[in-house]
Image (spheres, rainbow, N blue to C red):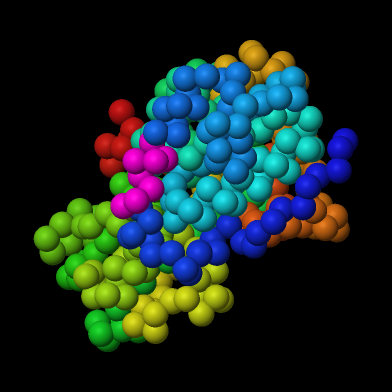
Amino acid sequence: MNTRRAVRSGGLVQANRGVSRRGFLAGSAAALTAAALAACGDRSSPVSSSGDANTPATTGRQTLTIGAIPDQDPEVLQRLYGTVADAMSDGLDLDVTYQPVTDYGAAVSLFRTGDLDLVWFGGLTGVQARLQTPGAEPIAQRDIDESFHSVFVVNAATGLSPADDLTPLADLRFTYGSETSTSGRLMPAFFLSEQGVDPQGFPGGPGFSGSHDATIELVASGSYQAGVLNEQVWNSRTAEGAVDPAVVQYARTPAYHDYHWLLGPQAVERVGDDLPGRLTDWFTGLSPDDPADAEVLELFGAGSFIPTEASNYTQIEEIGRELGLIS
């Protein structure tokens, strides 16, 4: 196996503090969409891992295009998944490129059409993509994804203290993350309903911030009094000192399966039947004792990657159907 390039950046959930999220979103959505359309039109000249759509593949190696649900700042995802593509290229002797998308639905759609070969999905979007793409295979998940959690946060002005009782949230202006986020909507809605709280019955109806970072910002500003997000993002932002003191953790959900890599059948047909095994072996073979591997694991906030299978997401599929998010 070739020596992997060292990943050049920090944790997956580390934000670029020099760029306003709202400003970046406004200026970059069109550019990202254009890049996606350009890339989908010509698989022989994939977008480079740095996101340069004019850089063709010249190595003669087989290609693999990876993607990810846009659950955080697009600039952070572009930079960080680009470095993962570089590491995979070296480790698997493939030309691996990262293709950004602008929303969760686009990730599912582009995976279904084969324009994205391997995608880092949340639990719900992974189930949606797999059901829409016969032959799709879960490849690996992080060690933390077999026991993942969401956290409910509130603005300190509510006067609420940490508790396991979710019923006080029912009277607050509340925001989820993306509408199809597992940790930012699906599982929190399930746990709310388990305690008798209508997950759609918040005053004025629930909001949908679009990402975990935005949920923190909206609760900090007082636009919403409470919200829910991915625990990994919350812990990382808190460790960075990036959370406004006005936002405090109120409750933590029980555990559930979440994020995973999903491989499309078109990639297997193109690259070879051994591709699923090669990918699983590469991910699960990443070792914290190897400096380059350790940086990739840190990038994902994981101690290791482990194998996974479709049955791990049965609960998510059932809840998704109950909430009308899977037909």
Q: In this image, 272 relative to 317: left or right?
A: right
Q: Residue 262: where, in percent of width, then height?
A: 57, 33
Q: In this image, 218 relative to 43: left or right?
A: left
Q: Nearer the viewer, residue 15 or 121?
A: 15
Q: Quadrant of residue 35?
A: top left
Say how many tags the image has: 0
Q: Residue 104: where, in percent of width, then height?
A: 39, 40
Q: Which residues are magenta?
A: 26-33
> Image quadrant for the N terminus?
top right
Q: Residue 27: where, in percent of width, then height?
A: 34, 51
Q: In this image, 298 relative to 184: left or right?
A: right
Q: Nearer the viewer, residue 96 or 204?
A: 96
Whether the magenta-drawn stretch holds residue 32 is answered as yes
Q: Nearer the viewer, residue 100 or 304?
A: 100
Q: In this image, 55 relative to 17: left or right?
A: right
Q: Residue furthest top?
A: 269
The residue at the point 52 percent across, 55 percent down is 76
In this view, 11 is above or below 186 = below
